[in-house]
Structure formats: structure tokens, C-alpha cells
Amino acid sequence: MIQRSTHKQVARRQSKPLLGIAYLTSMLCFSLAFAEIVDQSKGNISLEPSKSFKPEDYSAGPPSDLKKSLNDYQEKKENQTKKIRIDLKQAIEEADKASVIDSAFDKTQANSFSISDIRAKALKNNLSIEVAKIDPAIAGAALRQEQAKFDNIIFAYAQQSNRDTPRISSDNIGIKSNDNDLNGREAKLSILEQNIRTTDISAGVKVPLRTGGTVTLSSPIESKRDKGVFGSEEYRSAMRFSISQPLLRNAGKTVNEASIRVSEFNQQAIQYKTKLLAIRIIAMTDKSYWSLYEAWAQLDVRRQQYRLAIQNLNMVKRRVTEGLTAAIELNRAEIGVADRMEALIIAETNLKLAQRQLRFYMNDMDTEDRQPNIINTITEPNLVRYEFDREKLLNEALSARLELLELEVKLAADAINIQYLENQTLPLFTLDYQYGALSPSVNNLGNVYQNTLNGQFSDWSVGLKFEMPFTNEANKGRLEEAVQQRNKRLATKQLQTLTVKKEIYDALDQVENNWQRILAARQQVVIAGLNYDAELKQFNEGLRTMTEVLETLTRLGEAQIKEVRAVSDYQASFVDTAYATGTVLGYSKLDF
């Protein structure tokens, strides 16, 4: 009595008030949390992917070429300083045509590639891209698995059992019968010795519903053969239909299709990630291409420096022989040749490293030991200046940057996951219905379905099932985790947006900075060439030493190196600008 009373009190206290309060409280809290997330997600930018960056689309006006910019720069400079009259004819003219530099790097024997050729090879052969291509295939397989969750299931089974039982004495029983002779009598039952063989066969189809329920249609057949004093042979069949449908938890298409939509978003996110990797490889390949261009140009400058040093040495030898110059100048000229030989060796090594880096991106390292294995750049730098519309470029970046696209689809997947987990906090309340049309047959299997559909024999049942955890903390904890995960992604998106803005503005400033470096370096080359020519004339007149001539030659070489680096950095800054928008340079015509 005490246990029964306690059980009634617990049922009275727990099943009604506590269940109702817990359910209403959890639904109110998480509905408010999800509503806040939905409000935040309304501010998300609708993102569309793009892959082409064309500078002219964002320029405030037509671009100006290098010649016009140099004229403007020179005019501006002349207005600020005294006008200088110069003669460029003999600035850096070679004096000794017979002097030839033997080198393993000959452009006439090199394999020439344009930048579009290099990009295509990188996309086709780069191993990082080959590895990343597997991820979309894995995501596609995972999506197909989720889409197959509603596949119809065909089932069949067969079972045969045999029981050979001895005679068994059973319990005493009382008989109640319409026959007065039997009514009220007592008897003792005994199970006779017998052999029972039973065969069960069933086949049917199970249909998972997108609403969360399951429909089953089957046709079982049972054969029972009894050998004994009262032997018999019976056949029974049925057409059975059953349906089970959740009404709260796991109910509805939105909940049951949530995993499919999440897999679709995950597949999109992986595709964006793979495309981002391809763009990153293309950007690094472009910059490596221009680094190789710079290495070739620096090698040309160092060769020119070496030739000029050889010419000076030959000139000094003649003047020393003729008695016009002191012998000490010969030593100074030889030191100048040695210094430039070292710079030439370093330039050749840098060219080897630049070519090897480019081959690495193209996965073409096998040609390292084969001849000819030299790569020459034939795409010329695009030396035009653009005045970019910064706001337009920024808006394009915010709508096309692949990191933002990836975050956007992950946020959408988080929202679906939150809806699903919110549903999981509901009680499990299921409606079950089953109906069977029965048909018996004696000693004849062929008549087993004869009376199945006439309604003579049938059985049916209707049931309700209720289930809910006592505290429901596990489901509420998973929902809270999903909410916080989405909040984290929202904060990450805000940080990424700020990062994109910074990268865009930094890239645009670098473009302008490198353009100004080109203009300044070009002027330095002109002035340094004139200064070298003047110092050389002064040396021939005995007013300068060879050390002073070599110093001006060094300044000429450094000015040329500065110009080469500025040109290469200018092209690289366009690559960085395109990458900051989530695109590649538009004239490449690549597809991936």
C-alpha cells in the first residue's frame, strides 16, 4: 500500500505540472534565442560567387600608360626644380661589342610560356588542387547518403520451426459450458505427445515518410502441421497495413529533411573552399611568374653591369698602355669586374630558385635535370594606371569573397540545425495504427488468399505512445551548443568582413604605391645613366678615378634593379587586389 501510494504521488506531481512547466519554459527560452539569431541573419549580405577581376570595371576613368605618366611626372618635377638638359644617347650604350658573357641561361634556348599557359598548367597539375578535389566528391557521397534516407525498403523473411514434444501433465481446470453435464465439472488437461512443424513466410514493403512516419504493407503466410492423435494441417494468411506517425518530436518535413539540407550546404561550403584553394594557387602562381620575370630582368641588369665593367677594364688597359692613366686604375677596374661577377652569380642563382618555385606550382619538377629546362616569361607587364572606385570594389568583394560565401552557407546550415534541435526538445508522442485482413484455409495452400478481402476475418489496433526525459537537459544542452556555435560564426563573419575591407584598402594602396615607385625608379635610371656617362667622360679627361666611375655604375645598376622590382611588385599588387575580391585576373579565361 505504501509503494502504491508513493507511486501515485510521484505520477501526480511529475507527469502533469512538472512536465508542462519544463516544456513551456524550454520552448520559450529557445524560441527567443532562435528569434534573435534569425534577426541577426536578416542582415547577412546576399552573396553571389564571381571569378573574374577586371581592373577597368572599377576604374574611375580610362587608364593612363607609362609614357604619359612619365611625362606628367617629369613636368611636375620640372615645375618644382630647375630644368635639366640631358642627352640620353650615350647614357648606357655598350662600348665593346666583342665582349660576350657566357651563361647557361640563354633566352633563345628557353621554353617560353605566357602567364595564361602557366596558370592552366598549375590548375591541371598542382598536387594541392588534386588533393582538394577529393573533398567535393566526399561531400557529394555524404549528400547522396542523406537523400537516400527515404528510400523504400523491400523486406522478406522465412522461418521454419519444428517441435517434437512428449506427453506433459498440465494443471487442473474448471469447465463452464452450456451443457449441464459438463458445466461446473473439474478436469485435468494433459498435452499429448505430438510433432508440430510451423513455416512462416512474409514479404512486404516499408515506406519511410518525409513527415517522419513509416508505412508498412506486408503479406504474411503461416503453415502449421500437427502430427499426433488429433493431427491437422492449417494455412493462414493476412494482408497487413500499419502506419506509425510522430505528432511532436520528429514530426514534419522540415525536421526530417533537415539533415539533407545541412548536407547540401556543407557540399556548397566545401566547393567554395576548393575554389578558394584554386584561386590561392593561381594567385601564388601569378606572383611566382612575376618573380621569375624579375629574376630574368635582374640577370639582364647584372649582365649589363658586367659588360660595362669589362669595357671599362679594356679602356683602362689601353690608357695605361698609352701612358694616359696611372697603373693603379687598372687594379680598381679589375676589382669592379670581380664585384659584378659576384652579383652576376647571385642573379643566376636567384633565377634558378624562381624557376624551381614556378615548376613546383606546376608540379613539373621532373624536368629539373633535363635540357632545355629553362622557363622564359613572354607576357609583358601591363604598365597602365587605374584610378579605382574603392566603394564599388569593396562591395564586389563583400559579395564575392569565397570565405564569406563559405561562412554564409555554414550559417544557413546552423539555422536548420537549430530548428531540428529545437524540435528534439519536444516530447515523443506517436500515433500507431495497424489493420490486418485474415484468411484461413485447411489442407489447401491454394485457397489461402480466398477470403482475405471479404472482411470476414480481420484485426486492427490503434495506440498512442508518449515519452519524454525527466529533465530533458541533454536535448536542451545540444540546442544551446548549436545556438552558441551560430553566434560564434556570426562573430567570425563580422571579423572576416573587417579583414576583407582591410585587405582591399591595403591592396589598392599598394597598387598606387608601386606605380609611384615605377615612376620614381624610371627617373633614377635616366639620371644615373647620365651621371655614369658624365663620370666616364671626366675619367677620360683625367678628372675622375675609376673608383668614382664604378660607384656611378653601381648606382645605375641599383636604379635599374629598383625599377625592375617596382614593375614586378606592381603586377603582384594587382594579383593581391584580385585575390582580395575572391577572384582572379579577368583576362586569364580560366574555368574551374
Image (cartoon, rainbow, N blue to C red):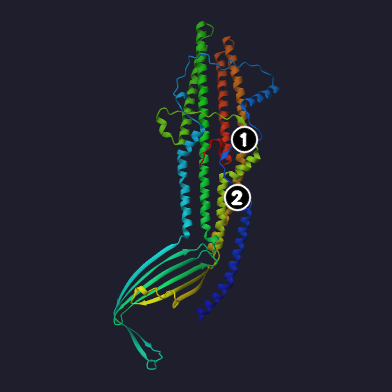
Q: Label 1 sits on what residue type?
A: Glu
In the rendered structure, are the residues bearing label 1 and label 2 in contact, judged by CB atoms less than 8 Å apart?
no
Looking at the image, is 424 positioned above or below residue 521?
below
Ranked by sequence position, the earlier of labels 1 and 2 is 1
Mark 1 vs mark 2, CA separation in Å: 34 Å
Looking at the image, is 291 positioned above or below residue 138?
above
Visible in this render: residue 481?
Answer: no
Q: Label 2 sits on what residue type?
A: Ala
**Residue 52 point in image, percent of width and height:** 57, 39
Q: Nearer the viewer, residue 565 or 67?
A: 67
Residue at which label 1 appears:
56
Q: For mark 2, does the 10 Å Cα neighbourhood hold few (<14), some (14 to 19), or many (20 or more) residues?
A: few
Q: For mark 1, does the 10 Å Cα neighbourhood hold few (<14), some (14 to 19), or many (20 or more) residues?
A: some
Q: Nearer the viewer, residue 80 or 317?
A: 80
Visible in this render: residue 474?
Answer: yes
**Residue 302 point in image, percent of width and height:** 51, 22
Q: Nearer the viewer, mark 1 or mark 2?
A: 1
**Dot label at residue 105:** none
Taking the view exactly as shown, the residue that stands out farthest to the top is 322
**Dot label at residue 491:** 2
Which secondary structure lies at badge 2?
helix
Image quadrant in which you'd find residue 187: bottom left
Q: How many marks?
A: 2
Q: Residue at x 62, y 60 (%)?
A: 32
**Residue 353 point in image, percent of width and height:** 47, 30
Q: Nearer the viewer, residue 88 or 20?
A: 88
Looking at the image, is 327 positioned above or below residue 168?
above
**Residue 206 point in image, percent of width and height:** 45, 65
Q: Residue at x 52, y 20 (%)?
A: 304
Q: Residue at x 63, y 53 (%)?
A: 42
